[in-house]
Image (tube, rainbow, N blue to C red):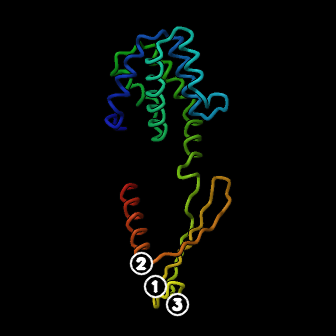
Amino acid sequence: MDSSIISDTVLSSLSQSSSLDLGTFNALVVIVSKMLCREEKYLDSEVRVKKLVEEGGDEALLTSLHSSLTCLLTLLSSQNSPPDVLTQLLEDLPLPPSHITSLVSTYTSSLPLIRSGLTNTTTFANRRLINFAWRLDYRVRSSGASMNEPVFLCNFRTVDNEGVEREEEIECGIAGVKDMLFKVGQAGEVLK
């Protein structure tokens, strides 16, 4: 894995974790890993971080570390990086060996569950496009008295995470189709 894709902000925040005692660091690592594993009682992890602050932790440091650990573990898990990649990355930081061992062992045991949680999470309101069809009609006369105007009827079929399919149909003119094609092209460029 190319470690340059991990931001310097994340790495500098992680290097500050050396000022935490091992117990607090372990608690924070467990909170983040269980949140990423989608365990129900850990989904509101900010509440658990606030408890660590109430126990005497530095709020700014713990919040920063929470965000950095979440970013790091999500990125490594999404690429299915082996634990030795995390070890190499952490050894470049001024961290105590006990912190490195704790984080790597938690990552190793949580990796399959984190990956499962990432795969079951989609964006765009949890709907995926599974079919697209269109046809061209001509409007001979409308309420606006336009004649021989081309009309595109676009049919989208989507499915959500539960497998429920839904069909949407839109009607648009040439300008609408050009705009849609442009936006689809932009989305395709982003995915490359």
Residue, x 34% and y 34% (percent of image)?
Answer: 3
Q: Position of residue 181 (x, y in %)?
A: 40, 69
How far from the left and from the top, in percent, is residue 140? 51, 91
In-image side of 146 versus 115 (left or right): left
Measuring from the top left, give residue 6's x and y in whole percent: 36, 34
Contact between marks 2 and 3 (CB within 8 A): the answer is no
- Sequence order check, earlier mark of 3 and 1: 3
Marks 2 and 1, how far apart at CA: 7 Å
Q: Please name the amino acid that badge 2 sits on.
A: Ile
Q: Secondary structure at mark 1?
A: strand
Q: Do tag 2 and tag 1 residues touch (Cβ < 8 Å)? A: yes
Q: Quadrant of residue 16?
A: top left
Name the disc covering residue 150, or none: 1
Circle 2 residues within 10 Å: few <14, some 14–19, many ≥20: few
Label 1 crowd bin: few (<14), some (14–19), many (20+), radius 10 Å: some
Depth order, front residue of 118/138? 138
Query: Rounded to the nearest whole Å, what is the CA distance between mark 2 and mark 3?
Result: 17 Å
**Residue corresponding to mark 3:** 141
Secondary structure under tag 2 reads: helix
Give the camera-side residue of 82 and 186: 186
Q: Nearer the viewer, mark 2 or mark 3?
A: 3
Residue type (three-letter) at the residue carrying disc 1? Pro
Q: Which residue is mark 2?
A: 174
